[in-house]
Image (tube, grey):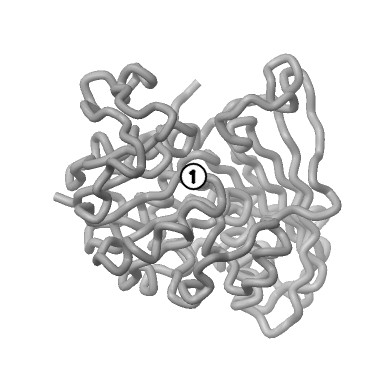
């Protein structure tokens, strides 16, 4: 059994990890930390876990995380970098769901996240945890930088087109929407029910932290200079993410060839569903699951290709993806513990 520790078990990604790992056949939950909730049984905070998780939260200094095989950090930015060096030195694998290791460039990280990076020596060691594009590296990794939710949709949507050299990498436009849970489990005016319900708005239009992450990863797949315009929006739902990706075709290609390109790319990806050409994937078709669905469109058979991508931002966009990486790191089937069917309605 894989002994698992979770640092920061009270947020949305933390409880999502608990939901998935509590029924994982090869996992033993060993420690769940929360300084504020030290001593509180997990099931008292999250009744959905009654009968599944018998542990209590423990303060970080009380939890012997070095006895774990892997530790997940479901914490704010900056926490994992403070604790990862000691854990790695003790032979513990680390999966960070925050952004501490997503950007290889230290200056870029400090510019976007406004905090100093305290262990830049680990940036090169960290493996970006998008299994569909980085599976072999993940299998041999000790430190995983779990991708952001928006970047997951953008990278999987653009990758086949960039790899095939079919689009102008300097004119990528991503129009993306996320449910309110993407903002985390905290009290802020903008995410209060009376503020976000019956409302729709864009945010961070001048620049979002996920832009440099996505652009840097996409740059790996093309010799062209990547220029990405990314606009996120907040929609009045709890879970779900919908990304509408636009790209300009630079070569003659048929719709059938485009469809075949995507189907061939993801034929061995158990959590990517390439739907028939012209389909309209819905966020609820992925709710509660680790599945990402996408569909291609080409208005008027012109030179613009549109990729529609949906996922659950808390599962494939966060906790499910982290478990997917853990499975690969420990030589398990990639789908282990992640075969939940989406909730309908």
Q: Nearer the viewer, residue 151 or 159?
A: 151
Q: In which quadrant of the rendered view does residue 21 lie?
A: top left
Label 1: few (<14), some (14–19) or many (≥20) C-alpha neighbours in 10 Å: many
Q: Residue at x 52, y 52 (%)?
A: 98
Q: Residue at x 53, y 57 (%)?
A: 147
Considering every residue shown, the one lying at the far left of the view is 1
- Percent across and percent down for residue 242 are 65, 42
Considering every residue shown, the one lying at the far bottom of the view is 223
Identify the element where label 1 is drawn. loop
Q: Is residue 228 left or right of residue 99?
A: right
Q: Is residue 265 left or right of residue 149?
A: left
Q: Is residue 226 left or right of residue 275?
A: right
Q: Residue at x 50, y 37 (%)?
A: 286
- Percent across and percent down for residue 8 are 42, 40
Q: Residue at x 76, y 20 (%)?
A: 195
Residue 198, placed above or below residue 319? above
- Percent across and percent down for residue 104 are 58, 73
Residue under label 1, please give it: 75
Q: Nearer the viewer, residue 312 or 41?
A: 41
Q: Nearer the viewer, residue 290 or 14?
A: 14
């Amino acid at each position: 059994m894989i002994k698992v520790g979770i640092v920061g078990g009270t947020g949305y990604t933390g409880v999502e990890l608990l939901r998935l790992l509590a029924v994982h056949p090869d996992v033993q939950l060993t420690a769940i930390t929360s300084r504020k909730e030290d001593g509180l049984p997990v099931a008292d905070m999250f009744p959905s876990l009654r009968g599944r998780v018998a542990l209590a939260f423990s303060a970080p200094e009380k939890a012997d995380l070095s006895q774990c095989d892997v530790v997940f950090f479901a914490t704010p930015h900056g926490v994992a970098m403070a604790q990862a060096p000691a854990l790695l030195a003790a032979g513990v694998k680390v999966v960070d769901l925050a952004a501490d290791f997503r950007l290889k460039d230290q200056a870029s990280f400090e510019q976007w996240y406004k905090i100093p990076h305290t262990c830049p020596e680990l940036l090169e060691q960290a493996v970006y945890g998008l299994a569909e594009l980085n599976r072999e590296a993940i299998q041999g990794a000790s430190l995983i930088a779990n991708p952001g939710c928006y970047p997951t949709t953008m990278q999987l949507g653009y990758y086949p087109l960039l790899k095939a050299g079919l689009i102008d990498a300097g004119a990528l436009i991503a129009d993306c929407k996320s449910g309110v849970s993407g903002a985390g489990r905290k009290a802020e005016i903008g995410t209060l029910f009376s503020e976000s319900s019956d409302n729709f708005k864009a945010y961070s239009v001048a620049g979002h932290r996920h832009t440099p992450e996505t652009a840097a990863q996409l740059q790996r797949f093309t010799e062209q200079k990547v220029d990405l315009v990314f606009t996120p929006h907040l929609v009045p739902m709890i879970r779900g993410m919908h990304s509408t990706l636009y790209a300009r075709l630079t070569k003659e290609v048929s719709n059938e060839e485009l469809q075949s390109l995507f189907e061939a790319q993801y034929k061995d990806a158990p959590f990517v569903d390439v739907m028939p050409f012209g389909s309209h994937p819905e966020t609820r078709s992925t709710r509660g699951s680790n599945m990402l669905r996408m569909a291609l469109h080409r208005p008027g058979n012109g030179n613009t290709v549109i990729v529609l991508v949906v996922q659950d931002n808390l599962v494939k966009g966060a906790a499910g993806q982290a478990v997917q990486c853990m499975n690969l790191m420990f030589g398990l089937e990639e789908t282990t513990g992640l075969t939940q069917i989406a909730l309908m309605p």
